[in-house]
Amino acid sequence: MKHTIPVTLIIILIFFLSQVIGLYALSYTIKGIGYTPEGEVVVEYADTAIGERPQLYDMGMFLYMIAAILIGTGLILLLVKFKKFKIWKAMFFFAVWMTCSVTLGVFVDPIIAFSVSIFLAFFKIFKPNMIIHNVSELLIYPGIAIIFVPNLNIFWVTLLLLVISVYDVFAVWKSKHMVSMAQFQTKSRAFAGVFVTYKLKAKKGLSKAARTVKGKKTAKTAKKEVASVEYRNAILGGGDIAFPLIFAGVVMDSLIKMSVAKTTAFAYALIIPVVVAIALFSLLAFAKKDRFYPAMPFITAGCLAGYGILWLLGSGIIA
């Protein structure tokens, strides 16, 4: 198992809560449901706290997101190469501030949303601790979903998952630049994703190096050095949270467009994060320690499996 069971369950819980919050916030942004002259259902979403969404739909939004991912990755790799931690922190601060504001702006006045979000962003980046870091994670990815979901359909969001899965495999196992980016973010203490640091069970006795040295003082020092490295970081990348949420959101949107009640569509869509959470737990359970794995292929499989289960339970309401 890659991490201890309690830590693994914490990661899964944070992931699942972010999905629930995201789907609920997305449903809350729906301000009306209308019909075209041809009788098709149109779902109207309120503008976000930071303004209107990009006026791109389906293939246009798909290409926009792919381009944004490639450009963003290129910029981060430049920062990794030149070790520009401060620039990364500034960029990440702005991203956290805006996305959290989008989520909170669904429920409260935009001024309050901006104020609370800048507080979260400041402590997340400049005074980091695990609680603030992971609480803000519950708000970041719903904000991303609120921006993109209304502009995608099932076909294009599925294609997006498949493309990102292939890219993830290449980036982790082939080029390994995703690993470099994760290590850079961890070192800068501004990691985009779930981050849990935990202490491993202390080893009994001294290390081999400690046993071979002479003198009690040296042995005690060696023992302390062994104990000081008994910590491990458990991480789950931000994309591994955002993309399944976007997929589930598009599924919920498509159900509403099929005249399914909003609360029913929300309940059906929750099947997807449940199945994805099981897929993630399986990955973490069978993964080896101290190795990086591309999570997106497992997440995509979970999304598609959840969609299939939803279709079966819905008695074919999804065309």
Image: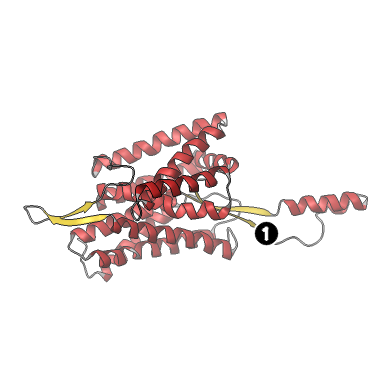
Nearer to the camera, 290 or 237: 237
Tell me the residue at 29%/66% (across/down).
Answer: 268
Query: Image height check: is 261 above or below 184?
Result: below
The residue indicated by pointer 1 is: 200
How has the structure been colored for display?
A: secondary structure
Nearer to the camera, 81 or 300: 81
Query: Image height check: is 61 above or below 211?
Result: above
> Disc 1 marks which amino acid?
Leu
Instruction: Give the x, y percent position of residue 204.
Output: 78, 62
Tell me the residue at 14%/56% (across/down).
Answer: 34
In this rendering, does residue 277 appear at all? yes
Instruction: Give the x, y percent position of residue 195.
Output: 54, 52
Asked where in the image residue 67 lies, by quadrant, the reply is top left
Tell me the residue at 27%/40% (across/down).
Answer: 54
Q: Is residue 134 left or right of residue 167?
A: right
Instruction: Give the x, y percent position of residue 19.
Output: 39, 58
Looking at the rendered image, the quarter that the N terminus falls into is bottom right
Tell me the residue at 60%/62% (across/down).
Answer: 4
